[in-house]
Image (cartoon, rainbow, N blue to C red):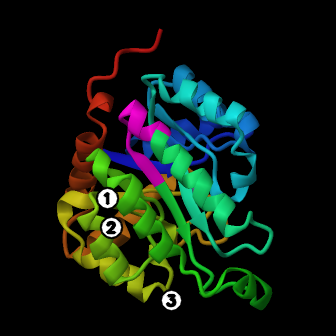
Amino acid sequence: MLIDSHCHLDDYPDLPAILARAREAGVGTLLAIGIGDGPATMHRALDLAHQHPEIFATAGIHPQEAHQTTPENLAKLTALAADPRCIAIGEIGLDYYHLDNPDIPTQQAAFIAQMKIAAAARKPITIHCRTSELAIPAAKAKYEPADAWEDLLRLIHEHWTPTNLPGIMHCFSGNEDQAARSLAAGFYLSFAGNVTYPKSTTIQAVAATAPADRILVETDAPFLAPIPLRGQTNEPAHVAHTARFVAALRGITPEALAASTTANFGALFPETLSASPLI
Ligand SMILES: [Zn+2]
């Protein structure tokens, strides 16, 4: 069995068909990311988790919406975080790539506020981190010399490490040093479809060598479809392609990769192993 550790399920016109294809591809559990189109709709993933036994949810305010981190929205997040089928807070973090994102202090304040909510709920966080490395010149001018990874790891060290709680580096796209520091901070590395792209040699090197007990696979659907489906709308069934690719990088069978990533998800979220049936 495979688990899609990160997918966005809010907007599929025919979700039952998506779930049926996931099941056929051996994808037994899905973690639906509850960021919505912004905080007003961040409850949607949890609604889906209450309707489908194979779906668990997160809730959080994406860094692109950090300017909407109002007391009301944080109260909403706190309420969602108390639900047993909301198993993590996220995706939260820093995004220094898009020119129209909130400024750095706004993003960092939103990230810190949500780490506090996750810590109080004793639930892991799932992280979005995007640097300005490949951004357009105007965005580089806005964010640099700040480095999203350096800021992220510093804020995690200050505000998350003391909680002794784990987390996930979603769509891990950093280098070997950032991987090592994430692992040392207790994070799991989740690999998405972009690991299959020919130019992703650094991500591939990390995926080949990261500890077997700290890796996950995800789709980030509907984005980032893996090769051979690159450019198409992604969906959870396609995590099987990413898993096969990562297995080949590691010189193990797809079955062995599926077994270890599923065990890792269970270690991170033990409540998913004994989830009570839906009412
Ligand atoms: Zn995502």
Report the amino acid beneath label 2. Ser
Measure the C-alpha gap from mark 3 to mark 2: 22 Å
Q: x%, y% of residue 208?
A: 27, 77
- Viewer-proximal residue among 4 and 173: 173
**Residue at the spot 69% in from the left edge and 45% down from the top edge:** 69
Q: Is residue 221 visible?
A: no
How many labels sit on residues?
A: 3
**Residue at the spot 64% in from the left edge and 44% down from the top edge:** 35
Q: Are marks 2 and 1 in contact (CB under 8 Å)?
A: yes
The numbered mark, 3 or 1, whose residue comes first in the sequence reads: 1
Report the amino acid beneath label 1. Phe
Q: x%, y% of residue 161?
A: 31, 55
| Residue extent of the magenta highlight | 117-126
Q: Dot 3 lies on which element?
A: loop
Left or right of residue 138: residue 6: left
**Residue at the spot 33% in from the left edge and 31% down from the top edge:** 272
Disc 3 marks which residue?
199
Asked whether mark 1 and ligand 1 are closer than 8 Å, the reply comes as no
Of tags 3 and 2, the one toward the viewer is 2
Disc 2 marks which residue?
182
Give the vertical position of 146 relative to 98 (above or below): below
The numbered mark, 2 or 1, whose residue comes first in the sequence reads: 2
Measure the C-alpha gap from mark 2 to mark 1: 5 Å
Q: x%, y% of residue 82?
A: 47, 24
Task: Tell me if residue 125 is in the magenta stretch.
Answer: yes
Left or right of residue 222: residue 137: right
Disc 1 marks which residue?
187
Q: x%, y% of residue 71?
A: 68, 35
* Crowd band around label 1 with a 10 angstrom C-alpha radius: few (<14), some (14–19), many (20+): many
Report the amino acid beneath label 3. Lys
